[in-house]
Amino acid sequence: MEQKCPWCGEALPGNAAFCPHCARDIHPRREAKKPVPLLKKLLLGLLVLAVLAAVGTGLWLALGPKAYDGCGEVLYGDYQVLLTQGVDRYTPVPEMTISGEPEGQYRVPSRLFVNDAHTGEDASEAFLAQVEAVSAEFTGQEDSPSPFLCSQPAYNPGAPECPLLSLIDFTGESGTAELVWTFSMKNGDTITLRQTYEVTPIPVYDYYPEDHPMDTAEELQALIDSISGLAEDLAVVNLHLPPVTYEGGITIRDRSLNLYGSTAPDGGRTTFAGTVYILASHAEISYLYDIDFAGSGGGTGLAGSAPFRTTNCTFTGWDTGVLAYGNSWANVIGCTFRNNSIGFHFDSTGEYANHSMYNDNLFEGNGIAVQLDNVPTDVALNFMGSVFRDNGQDIVNPCQQPLDTSKAIFE
Amino acid sequence: MLKESPRGSVQLIRHKGTGQRFILRRFTGNPEVYRKLLEYTCPNLPTVYEVACRGEENLVIEEFIEGDTLGFLLKGALFSQEETKKIVRQVCQALWVLHSIGAVHRDVKPENIILRGDQAVLIDFDAARFHKLEAENDTQILGTTGFAAPEQYGLSQSDLRADIYAVGILINVMLTGEHPSRHLVEGRMGRIVDRCTHVNPQRRYRNVLRLMEAL
């Protein structure tokens, strides 16, 4: 079979590789490969492997699920994700040291904040849109006699500034444990935020009438004033009051105090005929138990600009039985409000709520049983078991505070 | 006529039409390696343009490499170590092509290496053959005395390591002008020559790549 030279067109034998007419090569050729010494090949291979490994690792790191772990704070992409205890949304709180009475029961919030890492703006909505699931648990307290408990992260209307919050319950004997928030992201990433809680014992000082003069308002005030300078701020001071009637009032300032009333064999209880003030220069709660506040038609029975809580007390014959003002948060539980112009008056511009219960009270014969002009936060006040009877108005709520009166009794 | 022997001849020819010069080889034997080289180009091997056979006789037209052979140059002077390494590396590259198609040159020697400028070209594949694993011994004694490996004299089948043996001799001759059995070059190059020329092919460099690495 013949072929033609592609260069000169002359006829050639079919298997010719060379044209004798024009002296041109007509055979297809390929360039022989250059040898690469083994060492060089090995190095090149290793280089390729290293590059591939680096690329693979890079891709995996860039695209694969990642785990983020931080104490108090994690930077996740453009987000600063942090846990705090207070409302400062920029400062993570990796460790919480809380003082507690041995028998005391406490609840504090663990707040989640999410900020734009560049601008500092609230980015919680965008971040939470990427979250598949979030949970919280305590670890490292297997041997604790009183382990910490935490609620699962959720929005809490009592702390509207943060998107999620876990309530931490503990006692003075809870010791130390680690709270772990775990975020499972939709892209497979995992974020672990840790917060260590440590409870340190609070010293408790008890003052009894047998040891300290407190039969009159003046003596009691003098004792209170002296205690303010003696006991450390975090100490718990309990004043066990005799079953006497204090004709005047007292003022608790500078630090919180707990007042425990008592009952005489004839049934007489510790009674204040003058106003008791609890003034705000501290944020600790003053607790008042088993005390009667007996007014004579005017004034205020108990007025607090600092947090306080009254239990099993009575307020009778006042213009205002209990007034919470300033930055105060007040709770009345198991108390009796009778024959006051206003039984319980909330008019505080504070920012915190510490308890939502107003249960088992008796509001009877008041002009207004409960007046809510200003109440910190939107937490619903729960009047479960409280009885409203023969009041001019039961609840006046111009600030439209959420209320739960579903289990209250209106007679 | 450039060369004539009982096995054939080598002529320099000129194409009448173009004036281009070619090498025309006539030889008896196996033209397989030439045929295979029709498919390749390599700067360290002459381009084979045509292979024709009639019976035992073969005609090959190949590129004319203009330059002096190492054999000619070695008559006047020796090569430095750097020059030697550079030239031998290029010879190794030519052998790499042959070995990669399964061929063994079997006649590596200064007279079969032409320096074209700074390029070394390995020529003359008359003695070349394909390495067949089933062969126990070479069927003919081919190659040049002194440069041929022991196995080429029938001690065992020659494979690519026969070429490595010859390259070892070549290195020594380029550096000392003498066969290593008489005067082995000193130092590292001597050790390379020693390994190339080990009587046991198993102890030589396994392939030209290893030899190039050593160089």
Image (cartoon, coloured by chain):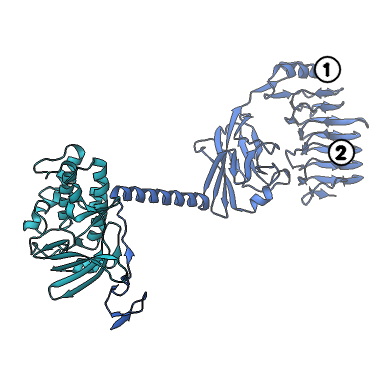
Chain colours: A blue, B cyan
Q: Disc 2 is attached to a residue of which chain?
A: A
For numbered disc 1, what is the local secondary structure?
helix
Q: Which residue is mark 2?
A: A343
- Judge the density around disc 2: few (<14), some (14-19), many (≥20) Cα neighbours within 10 Å: many
Rendered location of residue A33, percent (x, y): 32, 59
Q: Which residue is mark 1?
A: A218
Amino acid type, mark 2: Gly
> Which residue sits at x=75%, y=39%?
A353
Q: Disc 2 to disc 1, how far (Cα)?
A: 27 Å
Say which of A220 and B158 sits in front: B158
Say which of A150 and A47 sits in front: A47
For numbered disc 2, what is the local secondary structure?
strand
Give the quarter of the image for residue B58.
bottom left
Rendered location of residue A368, percent (x, y): 90, 42
Q: Disc 1 is attached to a residue of which chain?
A: A
Q: Is residue A390 visible?
A: no
Give the quarter of the image for residue B192.
top left
Judge left or right: residue A225 versus residue B143: right
- Judge the density around disc 1: few (<14), some (14-19), many (≥20) Cα neighbours within 10 Å: some
* Location of residue B132 with respect to B171 vertically, above or below: below
The numbered disc on residue B11 is none
Looking at the rendered image, the quarter that the N terminus of chain A falls into is bottom left
Judge left or right: residue A113 versus residue A245: left
Amino acid type, mark 1: Glu
> Which residue sits at x=30%, y=60%?
B42
